[in-house]
Image (cartoon, helix red, strand yellow):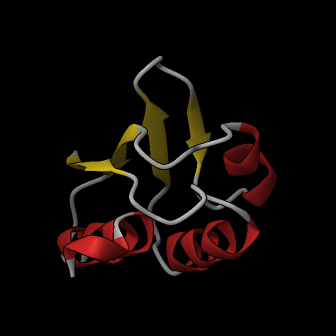
Amino acid sequence: MATRRVTISAHNGVHARPVAELARLALTSERPVTVRTATGAEADLASVLAVMDLALAEGDVVELETADGPSSDALLDSLVDVLDPRRR
């Protein structure tokens, strides 16, 4: 499995617009993409409602995970850019 750990720096946490972007990116993958919080709560990134239910806030640390594949690293990097725009 390919994973990335990221601290959310998106202003005001993860609200509707970034969640929609995460879902859009996840749906481009042939493999499921999961987000897991520090408490162990998980959601499929393709599900806007499931991700919104996690109530991710600025400063939260999450882990993104997907199956290994030719575009896994690029996909995870794009997802990290949405959650941590300050790292660019």
Residue at x 21% of width, y 72% of height: 87
Q: Quadrant of residue 84?
A: bottom left
Image location (x, y in percent) of residue 35:
47, 44
- Classify the position of the N terminus by image quarter: top left
Vertical side of 12 occupied by 27: above or below? below
| Extreme residue toward the top, this view | 39
Residue at x 60% of width, y 59% of height: 12
Vertical side of 52 occupied by 85: above or below? below
Front residue of 43/52: it is 52
Left/right of residue 14 with respect to residue 17 in the rendered view: left
Residue at x 22% of width, y 67% of height: 69
Q: Quadrant of residue 54?
A: top right
Residue at x 45% of width, y 35% of height: 36
Left/right of residue 73 with respect to residue 38 in the rendered view: left
| Extreme residue toward the front, this view | 11
- Classify the position of the C terminus by image quarter: bottom left
Vertical side of 51 occupied by 68: above or below? below
Left/right of residue 7 with respect to residue 43 in the rendered view: left
Vertical side of 77 occupied by 15: above or below? above
Could you tell me how many numbered marks the image carries?
0
Image location (x, y in percent) of residue 40:
47, 19
Q: Quadrant of residue 63?
A: top left
Image location (x, y in percent) of residue 78:
33, 78
Image location (x, y in percent) of residue 6:
28, 50
